[in-house]
Image (cartoon, helix red, strand yellow):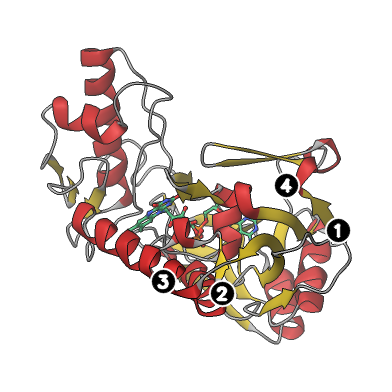
Amino acid sequence: MSGKWGGKCWKPTMLDRDSKKWLKDTVKGLVKFDEPMSRHTSFKVGVSADAFVAPQSLKELKTIVKWAWENDLEYMVIGDGTNLLVKDCGIRGIVLVLTRGFKDILTKDDSKDIKEGDVKVSVMAGCRLQALCRYAIEKGFKGMNFALGIPGSVGGAVAMNAGTSAGTMGKVLDMVKVVMPTGREKEIKKPEINFSYRKLTWGKEVKRFYPKKPIIVESRFCLTKGDPIKIKKEADDIVKCRREKQPQDSLSAGCFFKNPLSGKTAGELIEMAGLKGKRIGGAKISEIHANFIVNCGRASASDIFTLKESVQEKVSEMFNIDLEPEVKIVG
Ligand SMILES: Cc1cc2nc3c(=O)[nH]c(=O)nc-3n(C[C@H](O)[C@H](O)[C@H](O)COP(=O)(O)OP(=O)(O)OC[C@H]3O[C@@H](n4cnc5c(N)ncnc54)[C@H](O)[C@@H]3O)c2cc1C
């Protein structure tokens, strides 16, 4: 492997034989050791996680998190891995994945705290965001169309405050249910969460556990009842527009950089810097959308990382603007 941290960031496993045995004996859902993360990310890069665990139920998830807390073991939760660059040294500790369960969607329009015309939709974190969008269209609920075409899970979308210029998850969210780093379950209402551009910041009560973070297990959204035909028409237009503007079938994590707060978008700056099509190893700046870094098939995480650095350097040199990654770089 090449690059700044390609082969040199090896760290020993966090899991000893007893921990592995505990996981195997306790968890009824999927448990794999030394699982390549390239199988679980849209970039299709990243070597192994010490353990890859898909709990079957909320009870099981809470048991694992409590055990990790008591034994000082690190974990991270992933959804569909569509916004992740896993370093070539892999992930030490446990990767928890909720997309193999935790999929239910439930509508509530009978509780007292609902305004006339509103509906509350509760969704488990492992549900695909596109499944939620389709559900809203079928039911004639307005408010989710902005998220059409964004891949990944609902939990990941809330954690990233995913969105487009037409809306964000934070705008429609009403409440989340989380599992705290201690394994305790907690409901957190929207006023206790700060949403900003592709970012969720937890309030004080949660922050005291930092760097450990809560796991979102359920989110409740406030949507409005609308005309199903109009909602479907709007949805078709949004999907068509996305298809024309973004690379569809390439291996990427979507927009790699956040747009600067004013002025040109990250994609425009990268294009103006003459970087469209630039390639390092198997990683390339997309010809269709300059803010997409794509894996042409054989990229290592290091290739993608090195390309990201060269883009940042060139844009800074030419426009004096520091581009901040939107993609989470982990490992
Ligand atoms: C082709 C393409 C197009 C895209 N277009 C867009 C777009 O238009 N707008 C946009 O905002 N994004 C876009 N993305 C990025 C990505 O799809 C979103 O950020 C998505 O919401 C990530 O969801 P995920 O389940 O894949 O999360 P992951 O990538 O698995 O995780 C992302 C982050 O969320 C955290 N996380 C995941 N699940 C949970 C949970 N249950 N509890 C707590 N934390 C959690 C992870 O730890 C990680 O930090 C695009 C990606 C691709 C590949």
Name the element at disc 1.
Answer: strand
Q: Position of residue 277 (x, y in %)?
A: 10, 42
The reply to whether dot 2 and dot 1 touch (C-beta < 8 Å) is: no
**Which mark is first along the chain, 1 or 2?**
2
**Which mark is first along the chain, 2 or 3?**
2
Query: Crowdedness of circle 4 by 10 Å Cα count: few (<14), some, many (20+)?
Result: some
How far is disc 3 from disc 1 in space, using C-alphas? 35 Å
- Observer-side mark, 4 or 3, equals 3
How far is disc 3 from disc 2 in space, using C-alphas? 26 Å
How far is disc 4 from disc 1 in space, using C-alphas? 15 Å
Mark 4 highlights which residue? 212
Q: What label does residue 99 carry, if any?
A: 2
How far is disc 2 from disc 1 in space, using C-alphas? 20 Å
**Which mark is first along the chain, 3 or 4?**
4
Residue closest to the eye, 205 or 18: 205
Name the element at disc 2.
Answer: loop
The residue at label 2 has a CB less than 8 Å from ligand 1? yes
Name the element at disc 3.
Answer: helix
Residue closest to the eye, 77 or 155: 155
Mark 3 highlights which residue? 232
Query: Crowdedness of circle 1 by 10 Å Cα count: few (<14), some, many (20+)?
Result: some
Q: Residue at x 23, y 27 (%)?
A: 269
**Which amino acid lies under the numbered mark 2 shown in the image of this protein?**
Thr
Classify 221 as above or below 22: above
Residue closest to the eye, 97 or 331: 97
